[in-house]
Amino acid sequence: MSAPTVLVADDSPLVLRMIEKMLQGAGYGVVTAKDGLEAIEKAFAEDVSLVILDVMMPRMNGYQACRLLKSEPSTRGVPVVILTSRDQAGDRFWGLETGADHYITKDADPQGILELVRKIMAGPRPARGPARRDSVDILSRVNDLLDRKLFETTLLSELGRVARSLLNFDETFASVMKVLTRVVDFSVGVMAFVDEDELDTFLAVQRPVASAVLEETKARLLETVLREHGGAPFARVRARLFTLGPAEGVEEKSLGGFAAFPIRTNQSLSGVLAFGGKAAARIAGDSEVFLQTAAQQAKIVLENSRLFDKVKSISIRDSLTGLFNHRHMIDEVASEFARVGRYEGGVSLLMVDIDHFKRVNDELGHPAGDMVLREVARILKDALRTVDSIGRYGGEEFACVLPHTNHEEALKTAERLRSAIAEHVFRVGSRECRISVSVGVASYPAPRVDSPDGLLHEADRALYRAKEAGRNRVA
């Protein structure tokens, strides 16, 4: 059996000769290279068992050469030692980040270098693919690797750009999945978040698919999550569907393929990136390695976006009712007022106040009052459109912003709200009670409204008139 061969790359003839002589004296075969590109060529062409790379070399440095070697299937298993004259934290980080197996400084005891080589050689010999001895083929492969790394780096940079955009989660998810379509032309893309006993799943559909395809995708994903999660059942599983492209083309009736990339945080499953469709069955080995990295990056970007949305929601929501708070409703009025100034259409504002609310608190207690506020909030949300904004304006008063709504339409909406609340039976424990509301309506454009504050003032005036007229009415 022939002696194992070590490839040594260094642009210093003196260092190169010293290491070569030392290794040959220990019985190892040695192949030398004077720069990173030559090291890549010889690593592809020769049957080497270990590669020692200097960091600072012309044409291609040691970090770049290491990354390419670890990206190529035929050399991925060959151990790489990074050799440098510096012992800085940044150098050590980059050495390990590029996939190096070991890191050692040039000023170390030469015997220490030899002992490291012996230790590595004592391990199993790396499996190698077929050697490439044609120089044209070697340079072509180097160019392919460089192109792929540039492509992958660009995509990761795109994910970073999405993260810096501070979009809401829905926009961030759509942007992340569109970036990933450049790697996998999936029919259904999925990102799942695992949080203890809860599973949140987000599906992005890029082309028309049958409902059976979606169900199979979700089933395959759940199988993957349960397998990677240890089979523990989830107390809550939620799923949301997003459409990335236009609903055009022939509907796909079968899944065709499925590929999943588990994401772990502190050794525990925290998420899964998955793809369904014909392209998912054709993901090459190189792309699998990159997609595992991309999955981690995408999960971080989306997790941060979810957190941003959560913090933002807390800052603009009323903790008791879950409706928007006073400050946000002021912003909503200003925003809609500006929109009307730019486009056709109107906006109306309803001020809804619970009549004699103090009696509820005095007679039934403050917990009952809180329950009534939450129930009124629910009735308002159920009765209004999704485009309408509803907030707790203060105490027992609510504000409703109705875009594209003139004064006559707003009066009808207000009466519908008043009637719904008046007919509702509120249950507090074993007791029942009924309440009523007074509603003030203001709209823009209108003669006495020329600003957001003017719209708020007119709605307050209308609410006062409703109260003065006997309550349980609209004005």
Image (cartoon, rainbow, N blue to C red):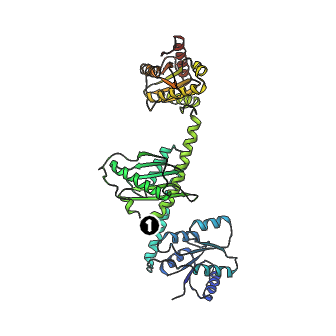
Residue 331 against residue 111 in the figure, above or below: above
Q: Looking at the image, how many numbered discs can be counted on the residues? A: 1
Q: Nearer the viewer, residue 410 or 10?
A: 410
* Amino acid on which the number 1 mark rests in the picture: Gly
Q: Helix, strand, or loop for circle 1?
A: helix
Q: Residues within 10 Å of mark 1 (few under 14, many from 20)?
A: few
Residue 30 against residue 89 in the figure, above or below: below
Residue 52 seen anywhere in this rendered image of the structure: yes
Q: Is residue 432 left or right of residue 247?
A: right
Q: Position of residue 351 (x, y in %)?
A: 52, 22
Q: Nearer the viewer, residue 9 or 408?
A: 408
Residue ID at (70%, 79%): 109
Q: Position of residue 171 (x, y in %)?
A: 48, 45
- Quarter of the rendering containing residue 397: top right
Query: Among all residues in the image, which is located at the extreme top?
Result: 469
Q: Is residue 296 left or right of residue 89?
A: left
Residue 32 seen anywhere in this rendered image of the structure: no
Q: Is residue 197 left or right of residue 214?
A: right
- Quarter of the rendering containing residue 90: bottom right
Q: Nearer the viewer, residue 420 or 426?
A: 426
Q: Is residue 250 left or right of residue 37?
A: left
Residue ID at (61%, 79%): 119
Residue 394 against residue 14 in the figure, above or below: above
The residue that disc 1 covers is 285
Query: Among all residues in the image, which is located at the extreme front?
Result: 430
Q: Position of residue 412 (x, y in %)?
A: 42, 20
